[in-house]
Image (cartoon, helix red, strand yellow):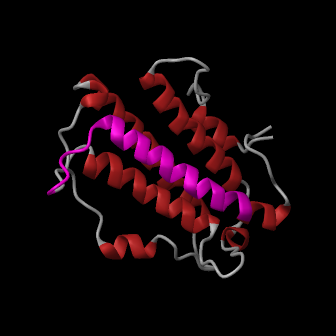
Amino acid sequence: MTEPFVDVLFDGVEAEPPVAGDELTTLVRTLERNRRVLAWKCAGLDAAAMSTQIGKSSITLGGLLRHLTRCEASTFVWKLNGGPSPTRADWESDWEWGPGSDVEQTWRDWRAAVERSRRLVAEALADGGLDRAKGQEFPGWGTPSLRRLLTDMIEEYARHTGHADLIREAIDGRVGEDAP
């Protein structure tokens, strides 16, 4: 059973990449699938569980959600649209997850970031499609296209979903790729 907020966030959002679809549909649905799997891995836990660490790693599920909230903004607000860049202090605070951390606020922040990112991607698609490159210019590298940024976000979620797999299994044994 999925948690209600996961169902609401993805209600009407096709989150399975097509078996043989076009590039745009494949990229967007792959990102949505990765978001959904990460949400399922982190869902239904209290602050204590969200602070669980395994081995020598300081990564927690709560920290992963905070980090991916920041990644959504960094990728689609800053890199795609040239908005304000996150500071080093912003990135360093991502992983902090203590007993007083607010689980519900963390989820609200992540959901808002995902919804904003969806809107910004839709706007970029209407303003040049996957080739649109009008955001942040990086000296010696250039301005990334929407195609590159979608690929970067897929990679970011995939890497951190691997972390979430290990942590969630250590918490309560939840394993698998998809919510039942």
Q: Quadrant of the C terminus?
A: top right
Looking at the picture, does residue 26 appear above or below residue 52?
above
Q: Is residue 96 left or right of residue 16?
A: left
Single out the residue that lies furthest toward the front.
140
Q: Position of residue 175 (x, y in %)?
A: 80, 52
The residue at 31%/29% (across/down) is 130
Q: Quadrant of the N terminus?
A: top right
Is residue 145 rendered magenta in the image?
Answer: yes
Q: Taken as a whole, is the magenta stretch helix, strand or loop? A: helix
Read off the magenta span: 139-166
The residue at 35%/43% (across/down) is 149
The residue at 22%/26% (across/down) is 127
Residue 45 in sight here: no
Is residue 150 rendered magenta in the image?
Answer: yes
Q: Position of residue 128 (x, y in %)?
A: 23, 25
Q: Is residue 103 left or right of residue 85?
A: right
Looking at the picture, does residue 72 appear above or below residue 179?
below
Residue 62 in sight here: yes
Give the total of numbered labels.
0
Q: Is residue 93 left or right of residue 169?
A: left
Looking at the picture, does residue 65 appear above or below residue 27?
below
Single out the residue that lies furthest toward the right.
173
Q: Position of residue 90 (x, y in %)?
A: 36, 71
Q: Position of residue 114 (x, y in %)?
A: 46, 44
Between 120 and 4, the one lying in front of the other is 120
Between 156 and 104, the one lying in front of the other is 156
